[in-house]
Amino acid sequence: MHSNKLAILCDDPAYSERSQAMADQLGVSLYPVVEKFTPEDFFLTYRDGCLKLLDKELLKKGGLMVDIEPRHGEQRSWPAPKEGALAQAIGRKTRTVVDATTGWAQDSLHIFRMGYELTCIERSPVMLKLLADAFLRLEQLSWVKNLTLPVPALLPGNAIDILAQLVSAPDCIYIDPMFPPKRKKSALPKKSMLILRDLLGDDMDREALFEAALQATAKKVVVKSPDYAEPLGGKPEQSFKSKLLRYDVYVKN
Ligand SMILES: C[S@@+](CC[C@H](N)C(=O)[O-])C[C@H]1O[C@@H](n2cnc3c(N)ncnc32)[C@H](O)[C@@H]1O
């Protein structure tokens, strides 16, 4: 992360202690208000009862939080049906999944809602703050409480190191690193993904991450990739296509 790009914004006194603690932990500035000349580009702030990420464009609009609601069209029962390209790639025989690149957790939360036993890894300190806030909100959802579902464990750090130290090998390791965008139509056009790229840049160590995942998995690695990108680990055993992207499946021999 380019830490000079980030600051904490606290415009609600109810959150001043938490905001100060977060600024101290991340080693960044804290502001009561953001002005045009404020040097940072991104801001973490508590708004509407949750932690949000803003850029200057989003300051007045509201900001981005990790959305814990089911996707449009997804069945709201638990476990949700294992349908669609992501579920096909992960497979029905899979029980345990590690998401090594959690990001905004939209894939993680989908995997969780389909009933897989999930562990999440993320290395960006900013995303970790947003994820921790989201998993607390997830824990409070009535269906999660009623079913006494444990929310996914969130492991902070570089997945290349963490995967090498896992106590038990998961059935599936899922990776969705940031690929360089194509000039025209991109598979990641959403504001949440654009802001992530601006904040973190591309994941240049994605090949090393793939190798670490293949070493650490018990059965398979699933790589999400934009449709224009070469498969990360060479020819996959299987590939499931969705809109503008692919899930490449590599089976461990
Ligand atoms: C494209 S985003 C993932 C989006 C995610 N699948 C979703 O549904 O929101 C990539 C994320 O993976 C994280 N990441 C990439 N390489 C990593 C690594 N080696 N270890 C831990 N996190 C990593 C980045 O910090 C970023 O937050």
Image (cartoon, grey):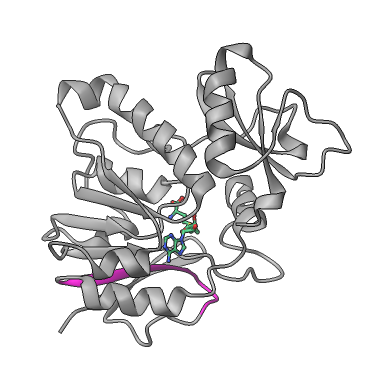
- Give the residue at the far right of this rendering: 37
Q: Is residue 145 visible?
A: yes
Q: Is residue 64 visible?
A: no
The overriding secondary structure of the stretch rendered in magenta is strand
| Residue 57 occupies quadrant | top right
- Give the residue at the far top of this rendering: 14
Quadrant where the N terminus is found in the figure: bottom right
| Residue 54 occupies quadrant | top right
Q: Is residue 78 left or right of residue 15?
A: left
Q: Which residues are magenta?
A: 219-229
Query: Residue 238: horizontal and vertical position, in percent?
Result: 28, 77
Vertical order, 157 against 13 (above or below): below
Q: Is residue 145 left or right of residue 247?
A: left
Q: Residue at x 29, y 27 (%)?
A: 139
Query: Residue 103: horizontal and vertical position, in percent?
Result: 46, 51
Residue sitting nearer the eye, 40 or 56:
40
Vertical order, 214 against 6 (above or below): below
Is 133 magenta? The answer is no
Residue sitting nearer the eye, 218 or 154:
154
Quadrant where the C terminus is found in the figure: bottom left
Query: Residue 230: horizontal and vertical position, in percent?
Result: 49, 82
Query: Residue 251: horizontal and vertical position, in percent?
Result: 21, 78
